[in-house]
Amino acid sequence: MTATGEHHIVKSYDVELGKLEDALARMGGLAESQLAAALQALDSRDSDLAGKVMANDGQVDALQSFVDEQTVKVLALRAPVADDLRSVVAALKVAGEIERIADLAANAAKRSLVLNRLPPVEPMRSLLRLGRLAQVMVKDVIDAHLGHDADKALVVRDRDQEIDDVYSSLFREILTYMMEDPRNITPCSHLMFIAKNFERIGDHATNIAELAHFRVLGKAQLEARTKKDDSAFIGGEPV
Amino acid sequence: MAEQVAEPKMTTRGLAVHYGSKLALKGVDLDITGGEVTALIGPSGCGKSTFLRCLNRMNDTIAEARVSGRATLDGQDIYGPGGIDPVLLRARVGMVFQRPNPFPKPIYDNVAFGPRLHGLVAEGEEMDALVRKALERASLWNEVKDNLGQQGTGLSGGQQQRLCIARAIAVEPEVILMDEPCSALDPIATARIEELIDELRESFTIVIVTHSMQQAARVSQTTAFFHLGEIIEVGATEQIFTAPANDLTQGYITGRFG
């Protein structure tokens, strides 16, 4: 008997790890659809849909609480080691990241309620583009984590640069519209916050990519990605 | 400045053991670092206890056991002509067994046995001091100081095992081999032994065979995984238990083996 199986000798251990994995999959799916619905609500100026997104945020929170409890339980009762340990620790942290993603999506939906009462502004198109990039990134990174795919996780991680670039250019675009006409300032300020939410979602997805990588390969820390979101410097250039 | 790499306390190269025609250990290379705890883990029959017993020639007592390859203590051969005398070797490399096995003698005589055999100190005050020191280092002194004339076999299991550790360290060995020292003990007695191992590590090199993964993880700095008479993986304990390099190791320690 030398083979290393996929399954634990103690079957209930597999069941408990499976519960964690299922909860993460459901959380990931929910966060994805929350983000998709928030984008839809922004695009079609649909306040009812935005309200639903806000109401559904509690489901993600509840799943996160479940993951927290289940993680503590497995750590206490099974004393996991090696890849099991990495899976459990990663699950705890990934659940935190997904919860933040869903929160940011719900916040975007909330701001859309104000936007829907104001005339449409042009930068919305770029904002939606940014949101869709974030949405794809979230989907892919959760797939990579659940599929134990470290290579895919790295590819997704690198995509955060694109999000940062789009965010920076959107930032400039929004500034331009605000300068052009002061009536744009209110909607554009909300757009700016939503854009920041989407940019943050990209960062959380990056964190999940690193956790997926750690879970599969056991390397604690990847080399830090050079962050090139230069929006923090915009407006400070000499004219 | 490059860090000085210390010579290993003990080494084995191609160490093999036959029991009759059965090859129990298939040529094992291992370096045992001084002042550290090295844990040997692996399923029953993997050769870890056989390996441990080679380190102080306990296999000599088994008629059909045949040892080949090299083993050294401080660079000096343990086997072969010119090797260390087995009696001296066992004074330098002590052993603690799975079941506590105190002699059916008073506690005092249990500890004084080795020093008397090797004529380490004179009877009387010197021996008293040595016995006391060994019992203190084995964290047993406070429990037995008023009853040193009591039979060692009359102590609880955990106390008996600490008495055996006191007996082992009384002759000031350099290396202590422990063969599942806690498998017959309850969790409290186990914790006491583990705490003791932690303290003893400062003065002795310790090699421990254990069936408890968690024990290996708790007490050792280096872990070697044995399987079918070979070392599959050896590395820093932290690495073995968080990210083992070998699938067999991972399967074994996570309970997905076989």
Image (spheres, coloured by chain):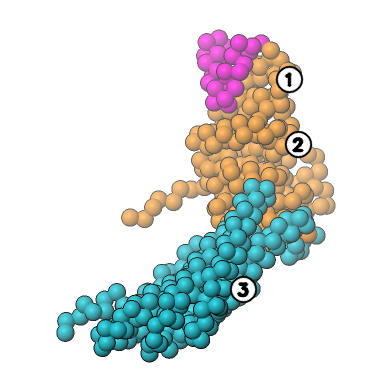
The hue in which chain B appears in the rendered picture of the protein = orange
Instruction: Point out the stretch of residues depicted in magenta.
Output: B120-149
Amino acid, disc 3: Gly
Looking at the image, residue A223 sits to the left or right of residue A230; the answer is right
On the same chain, marks 1 and 3? The answer is: no
Query: How many angstroms separate mark 2 from mark 1 (CA)?
Result: 25 Å
Q: Which residue is painted at 81% across and 43% down in the image?
A: B64
- Among the chains pictured, the one given cyan colouring is A
Q: Residue B108 at what x, y percent from top left?
A: 63, 15
Secondary structure, mark 2, is: helix
Secondary structure, mark 3, is: helix
Q: Is residue B132 magenta?
A: yes
Using the image, determine if residue B170 lies above or below residue B108.
below
Q: Which residue is painted at 53% across and 70% down in the image?
A: A54
Q: Residue B230 at what x, y percent from top left?
A: 69, 56
Using the image, determine if residue B135 lies above or below residue B62.
above
In the rendered structure, find residue A29 and report the number of the disc placed on it.
3
